[in-house]
Amino acid sequence: MIDQPPPLPPGADAESRRSAVYLVMAQIPPGKVVSYGELAAMAGLGRAARWVGRLMSQLPDGTSLPWHRVIAAGGRLSLPAGSTAGHEQRMRLSAEGITLINDRVDIRRHGWHSAEHSG
């Protein structure tokens, strides 16, 4: 079970929201992935997938957070294959034993806690 922060109040400040996302993201184990939407839900942010996506694009250089394990819905990789970050994400996932087929991850095989947070 993950250390799940309590649901944040609707008016929670950006720092509280960011901290909640980082807490959950830090716990994604190697070889597992989670979607932006699932990460938002686990962090107590409800349906804030787009906000999580924007937050991910603003991570500081050299972060130790496993950002590469956060993917788009349906197992899609959202970073372009030709980009530096996209290449790094693909390399990191591959190094953890995650196979990509047509730039998609098999969520049933590699998804993390997704069943606990659906519906």
Image: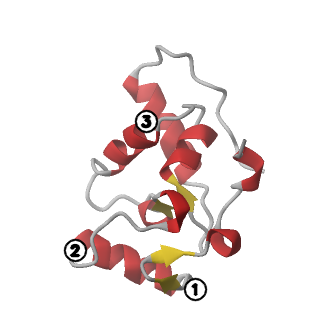
Q: Which residue is mark 2?
A: 84
Q: Position of residue 105 (x, y in %)?
A: 54, 74
Q: Residue at x 57, y 65 (%)?
A: 33
The amino acid marked with disc number 2 is: Thr
Q: Which residue is mark 3?
A: 18
The secondary structure type at the circle numbered 3 is: helix
Q: Reply above or below: 94 against 86.
A: below
Q: Nearer the viewer, mark 3 or mark 1?
A: 1
- Count the numbered circles shown: 3
The secondary structure type at the circle numbered 1 is: loop
User: Which label's residue is closer to the chain start, 2 or 1?
Assistant: 2
The amino acid marked with disc number 3 is: Arg
The quadrant of the rendering that contains the C terminus is top right
Q: Position of residue 103 (x, y in %)?
A: 42, 78
Distance of label 2 from label 1 (alpha carbons): 20 Å
Distance of label 2 from label 3 (alpha carbons): 24 Å
User: Which label's residue is closer to the chain start, 2 or 3?
Assistant: 3
The amino acid marked with disc number 1 is: Gly
Mark 1, residues whose alpha carbon is within 10 Å: few (<14), some, or many (≥20)? few
Q: Which residue is mark 1?
A: 97
The secondary structure type at the circle numbered 2 is: helix
Task: Find residue 7 and report its image quarter.
Answer: top right
Mark 2, residues whose alpha carbon is within 10 Å: few (<14), some, or many (≥20)? few
Q: Nearer the viewer, mark 2 or mark 3?
A: 2
User: Which label's residue is closer to the chain start, 3 or 1?
Assistant: 3
Distance of label 3 from label 1 (alpha carbons): 29 Å
Q: Reply above or below: 24 against 76.
A: above
Q: Reply above or below: 82 against 16.
A: below
Q: Residue at x 43, y 66 (%)?
A: 68
Q: Position of residue 58 (x, y in %)?
A: 27, 47
Left or right, 15 with respect to 36, comes to left
